[in-house]
Image (tube, rainbow, N blue to C red):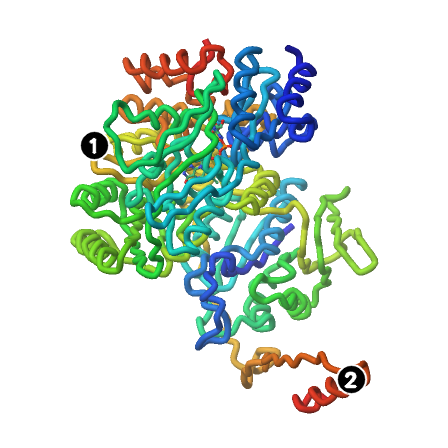
Amino acid sequence: MRVLVCFKMVPKLEDLLDEDWQVGEGLGPELSYAKMIINPDDQSALELALRLREARSPEETYLAALSLGHSDQARRVAQSLLALGFNQVGLISRDGQEPFAPDVAALRLWPWAQRDFQLILTGARSADGQNGLTAMYLAELLAYRLITEVIELRAGAGGKIEVESLSDEGLVSQNLLGPSVLSVGNAPSAFLRVPSLKDRLKSAPLAPEILAGPQLAGDSFAELVGLERPDRRRQTRLVSEGGAEEKAALILKALNDWGLR
Amino acid sequence: MNRAEIVESLKKIVGPDRVITEEGLLKEASVDRFRKYENICGVYTQPLPAAILYVEKSAEVAELLKWASSQGVNLVPRAGVSATEGGLETVVPDSVVVDCSRMKRIISIDPVNMQATCEAGVSLQVLDDKCRALGLTTGHSPQSKPLALMGGLVATRSIGQFSTLYGGIEDMLVGLEAVFPNGQITRIKNVPRRAAGPDIRQVVLGNEGGLCYITEVTVKLFPYYPENNHFMGYLLADMKLGFEILREVMVKGYKPSIARLYDHEDGAYHFSHFAGDNCVLIFMAEGPAGVAQATAAGIKALVEAHPECQAVDPKHIERWFAHLNWDPKAIAEERVEIKETQNIGHTTEISANWSELYPIYQAVIKRVRAEVPDLTLLGGHSSHGYINGANIYFVYYYNLVNIKPEEEISKYHLAIKKIIVEETLARGGSMCHHHGVGKHRVAWIKEEYGSSYYILKTLKEAFDPNKIMNMGDIWPIE
Ligand SMILES: Cc1cc2nc3c(=O)[nH]c(=O)nc-3n(C[C@H](O)[C@H](O)[C@H](O)COP(=O)(O)OP(=O)(O)OC[C@H]3O[C@@H](n4cnc5c(N)ncnc54)[C@H](O)[C@@H]3O)c2cc1C
């Protein structure tokens, strides 16, 4: 069985100073000084994949990991995934200017995901994106089944894989019947393990593959036509005088003044 | 005296409300961060103390110590519980843990004489924040600043991250009050200097609760100029050159507040976003604007005369530094992470003269790599420089493979500490730079002191003849 885990590098937001959160010229906080880490949900996806292989016969489970971008930090992380026993780690080149939109990400991952992987795991949400859409787009492109909010994978009898996921109704357990995309979210007890120095040394001759990204012109689900900052100005007027009726009138007037009514 | 009798006596001394005998709390009180894995797993291997006692006044402490001396009951003083070397372990059955965290009165912040006096249970973070609001600082900034209390910081001879400018706690402490096992309350007055015989503050400083109970401390204050801080960072390929540059900075007479050198492993842990596989040199200059500028310019010229060093954007250093301290939230997060990943980290800090630092560093790394299994990180940094040498803070993480919780220490942590201590002592260094001896470096204490162990031994015999003060810490139980 071939398993692919798609992971994303995200900034460690705890490292920012207060001044980095002041939105200046750009459209968001100043992230250039933040350390990059594997997105927490993606770490869980990587760990669940490693556990699945341990639970099945390890020889029968081929593990690959794939990410967009090949910065030095991404390469380091990729190297440590090789040390943890991933058979293959690919880093797809991406144009630095390209917005990190979920549809674009899915399109970039798609050609590699098509290479005979029966199981594709991703984190449900990224720390900086939070839209949860990449897995959905990817499943649509591949025409695979999608299970969201996955929290556990188990090797069942007869080579079956049992997936546990959260739904509005509660915990759902199901056996995988065909190729699937699993979006892993809020999995408890699924911190990514740490490779030992010996494993790192052993895997030093291996290297992540730098993969050329596909040309995307015209292929995106949507075309970006503009960005605008939402108007988040706040105004306050204290209404303390008068009885209830008078207060209601004053509130109404304020709403009118502010164009909110 | 049996446990019940001990508890009854304690209740008579301080009243029932301040004597805690709840089993869960006693278990936690039997260890410190040395046995953090056992603690996380809920496995406690040390004899449980009979009680935890919260003291509030010096007179009460005096009565307690006199009683313990007469009954032979072992007392383990406790402050902020950030000890890392087993200083808080209750190795003697039915010990009493004597906690000073309720002695938290700031007695004075004196901007004329530039000193602050407070009770032993005052948090350094609280004291320094109060001083900073007045444009002053204690200059003390250990990474445990949000956790540690003033009594504990004095008891362990702690040191902060700005030590190259402000010194260790021994340079900051002006005077104090301490209670000795015979019930004697002693006060050492607050003066700029004295030559009236030996400096007796040193008997109290670093005693780790083995000689006396600290109840009050006075520390120096300095003006606080954060707006003048200059951060500098450089990448370089090897530690040997790094030590040479650190030495050059110190020997030429510069006084940066921070002078640090990280090896590539420890560096990768902290600085993966800009350091690649390099070692990292870090400096911070502070003080009045002109002094800070001149210090920064001098160090910059000195480091940049070495073409092997590549400057990094100082904003990286500033951001890294802003998040270095450990608060209770970080401790709680670490617990979860250790439990989940079964990967744990510890540290051991030593000091040595300049000529021995690199040989010690090399020997330790080589031996630990060869002799200890399951390592995931082995590195170190130097974070406190002096005219004649510096410290090395070895950092090691390992995966916990096929062990019971109580085997973590012997299989990994002590095995590594032993190598570090052996290699340091063999080259004339000190096995403890700032965490204290605790209960786990006692095995080498005689080697550490050599012939001067006579002085240390005599101190214990003179001040604690009935062996009631934190037995097994610093002094071996013989
Ligand atoms: C995350 C972390 C970072 C750290 N960073 C640093 C650092 O940068 N620099 C540094 O020097 N240390 C550091 N330490 C070690 C530790 O914080 C220091 O040793 C500190 O001084 C302990 O203070 P405490 O108040 O927590 O004392 P405790 O841990 O409660 O006690 C420490 C020792 O002092 C004794 N003691 C406590 N109170 C008294 C008293 N009133 N009278 C007599 N003896 C007493 C205890 O018996 C024990 O032996 C760090 C520890 C942690 C966990």
Q: Residue reaching furthest right? A: A169
Q: Nearer the viewer, residue B443 or B6?
A: B6
Q: Is mark 2 within 8 Å of ligand 1?
A: no
Q: Identify whether B254 is placed above or below A70.
A: above
Q: Chain of mark 2?
A: A
In the picture, measured across the screen, residue B266 lies left or right of residue A12, that is left
Label 2 sits on what residue type? Ala
Q: Looking at the image, which residue is at 33% across and 59% down?
A: B314
Q: Is residue B211 visible?
A: yes
* Badge count: 2
Q: Nearer the viewer, residue A245 or A200?
A: A245
In the picture, measured across the screen, residue A174 lies left or right of residue B277, that is right
Task: Return the residue at label 1.
Answer: B355
Task: Return the residue at label 2.
Answer: A248
Label disc, if present, on residue B124 of the rendered structure: none
Crowd around label 1: few <14 · some 14–19 · many ≥20 (10 Å): some
Which quarter of the rendering shows the N terminus of chain B? top right
Label 1 sits on what residue type? Ser
Report helix, strand or loop for mark 1.
Answer: helix
Q: Quadrant of residue B195?
A: top left
Q: Looking at the image, which residue is at 62% across and 30% down?
A: B28
